[in-house]
Image: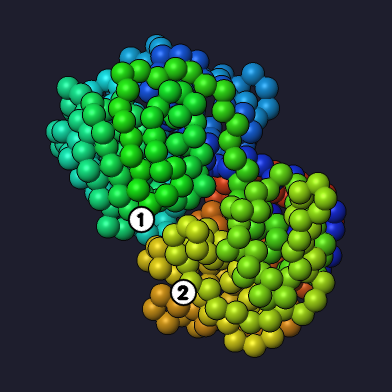
Amino acid sequence: MDKFVIRGGRRLSGEVVVSGSKNASLPVLCSSILTDKECTFTNVPDLEDIKTMCKVLESLGVEVERPRPKTVLVRANGLNVFEASYDHVKKMRASILVLGPLLARYGRAKVSLPGGCAIGVRPIDMHLKALARMGAEIELSHGYVVARASRLKGARIVFDNTTVGGTENILMAAVLAEGTTVIEGAAQEPEVVDLAEALVAMGAKIDGIGERTLVVEGVDELSGTNHRVIPDRIEAGTFMVAAGMTRGRITIQGARPDHVTAVIDKLMEMGIDIRSDNDGDLVVDGDRDLEPASVETVPYPGFPTDMQAQVMALMCLARGVSSVTETIFENRFMHVPELMRMGAKLEEKGRTVIVRGIERFQGASVMATDLRASASLVLAGLNASGQTEVRRIYHLDRGYEALEKKLNALGADISRERGGL
């Protein structure tokens, strides 16, 4: 397995371009199942999760091409398999997003129960209950979801808890359903908005985009589209934290400031200066002492759970006591013992971690446990004295495009090496 070897203590400076959003690309790729016309998606990052989703689509008989970097052409007119097998789905839980489109267009689907990062149970029962309300017959059999429907019917769907994947799955199912579907308690994340806008460009009728209630009027068919995926707000946030970790100054190009408002507000509260320049790029100046803060993860537009680990690493360098409360996932503090190996003073109290500031991290060998935890360890390594080894960086490759190359271009000293578990 690959690992990162980081020689810390270098101040980062320069410009970096944010890649397209992984979490927006995945459902948008699945939306191609809803039409027999060609779909072209641009600004798609070159990531392991994207490759996995393309393999899932190809296993269904969908034609997928990458004619040039950042571009994916998808043609689902030859789709002739309605089963997404365990071998493909086990690598990434977002593969469940083929369920709604398959059921909506073809009336049948067999999809393996999903895998992915070990950050919590993340059940899909809300997806299945909503599809059942739309008339689907659903059975769980031998690790698979087996679903059938002659044609889905519009229904009133109420999500008591925010579910991004559930909103995306039902939104895709509803655009070809008969009649009107009302989704109450819909997730408002930019990735959901991006999917909705792609569907509208294909001919879907969706009102309330970006709001808690979505109203979808089903249509008989959809056309193809040419859609540019939004920038990755979590990558942008990670580079903002990198500036603060190294007392650096980074210009982040291509980000959407309106997508990272909660992160910007929290980092500025901690003493990091963030502003937009005349070109609309974000200029992040971290060359000052950090102040302690408290963070609680909540659904968008609140502070994102996908930035929790990175900001915890930053809080370790603040003067005083900070706290991080995780409300989204029940098992997302696996980076805590690894940060402690690097000298962090952390104390878990249920869903909250108390963070007591230290002067600097110490280089050590640590192990990545999930995608965002991996990022927090790399950030700590950038600050640390001595050498840090971050093992199992395949987690990082799922969600950060060429991370070490981008950081090295800013002045970091990171090498990718073979060896270690």
Would residue 359 be found to the left or right of residue 146 on screen? right
Tell me, yes or no, if residue 68 can be seen here.
Answer: yes
Mark 2, secondary structure of its residue? strand
As displayed, is residue 398 above or below residue 330? above
* Gap in angstroms between the C-alphas marked 2 and 1: 17 Å
Locate residue 360, reporting x and y percent.
73, 78
- Residue 15 appears in view: no
Could you say which quadrant of the image residue 152 lies in?
top left
Give the residue pinned by disc 2: 325
Q: Nearer the viewer, residue 330 or 129?
A: 129
The amino acid sitting under disc 2 is: Thr
Q: Secondary structure at mark 1?
A: loop
Q: Quadrant of the C terminus?
A: bottom right
Indicate which disc residue 162 carries: 1
- Of tags 2 and 1, which is closer to the observer? 1
* Amino acid under disc 1: Thr
